[in-house]
Image (cartoon, rainbow, N blue to C red):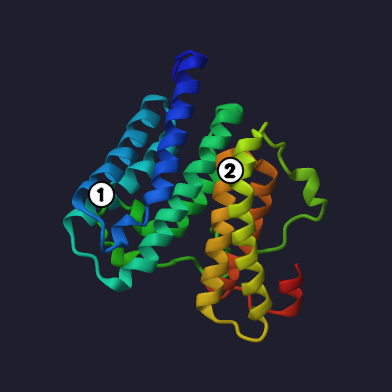
Amino acid sequence: MTSHDSNSLEQFLQDASERLQYLREYAALPVEPQSTSDDLVRLYDAAHELSESAARWSFPLFSDIAGRLAHVFQYARKAQLSPDTYGPLTEFLADAISVLEFDLLQISTDGNETVDDIAAFKHRYAFAFGGMTVPPSALEDELPADSGADGRDSSPQSEGNLADDLPDDDDVPSEVLDFFIPEAEEHLQIATQCLLGLESNPDPEEIHRLFRSVHTIKGSAAQVGLRRLGAVAHRLEASIGQLRDGALRPSAEITDV
């Protein structure tokens, strides 16, 4: 890390958080028919500034991911996207923003980056980090069959009480909770509906819908400082990713878990 003072770091964290919130809110614009070139320029500018400011603060992993986002927005502005790229592109953007949110949360906690999570993200989207210009049509899942959604080995983790490993929450203002809770409840309802239907109808689209709901909860929880909820959602997302990738098959036991 550079030798900037703590006030400057706090300003970086605040600015980065605001830009990430903007990207999460508008990241779907590249696949929206009403989006304009100006919309994509603003997305590019936000991602590019994230990359530049993180580099100045010597957070290279954050800078790299943000730079890839900027590249995608620049590509979407200049190229005509086909409908079959919409789903993979949206998923890549959401995953990238989520891993940046968790990285920023870790930086704010102890000044270090989430090396393992970012390595897993790069493994999942390895084609995007090879130094070549890759069109969004290549944004497909390239995990090996025995890996989970986060790129780690799917072998069972050590036994223990999950609650013992959960981080402490930040002090979250009541007005933030008033905004967060209704949105989280909506996504939890969607997740419950998807889970109830999985045993009788393991529809891939429903698994994707389930993944997106939990992914949104994870990202939103990290954004507002609900670290415990974010950590649980992170593990749940990894399990759903294994269902999505075919490493696990839906069953009553998995649904209960």
- Residue 175 vertical position relative to residue 148 in the rendered view, above or below: above
Q: Residues within 10 Å of mark 1 (few under 14, many from 20)?
A: many
Q: Mark 1 points at which residue?
A: 40
Residue drawn at the location 29% of the way across and 72% of the way down? 83
Amino acid at circle 2: Ala
Secondary structure type for disc 2: helix
- Residue 111 vertical position relative to residue 176 in the rendered view, above or below: above
Label pair 1/2, CB-CB below 8 angstroms: no
Earlier in the chain: of badge 1 and badge 2, it is 1
Q: Mark 2 points at which residue?
A: 222
In the foreground, 107 or 14:
14
Secondary structure type for disc 1: helix
In the foreground, 224 or 71:
224
The C terminus, quarter of image: bottom right
- Residue 56 vertical position relative to residue 255 in the rendered view, above or below: above
Residue drawn at the location 27% of the way across and 42% of the way down? 42
Residue drawn at the location 43% of the way across and 61% of the way down? 91
Amino acid at circle 1: Leu
Locate residue 178: give its quadrant: top right
Q: Is residue 148 left or right of residue 30?
A: right
| Residue at far left of view | 78
Q: Where is residue 33 in the image (x, y as percent from the top left)?
A: 26, 64
- Residue 158 vertical position relative to residue 177 in the rendered view, above or below: below
Q: Can residue 153 be seen in this view?
A: no
Q: Position of residue 117 (x, y in %)?
A: 54, 48
Q: Position of residue 218 (x, y in %)?
A: 59, 51
Locate residue 168: give its quadrant: top right
Real-space CA distance between mark 1 and mark 2, rounded to the nearest whole angstrom: 25 Å
Q: Residues within 10 Å of mark 2 (few under 14, many from 20)?
A: many
Residue drawn at the location 35% of the way across and 59% of the way down? 127
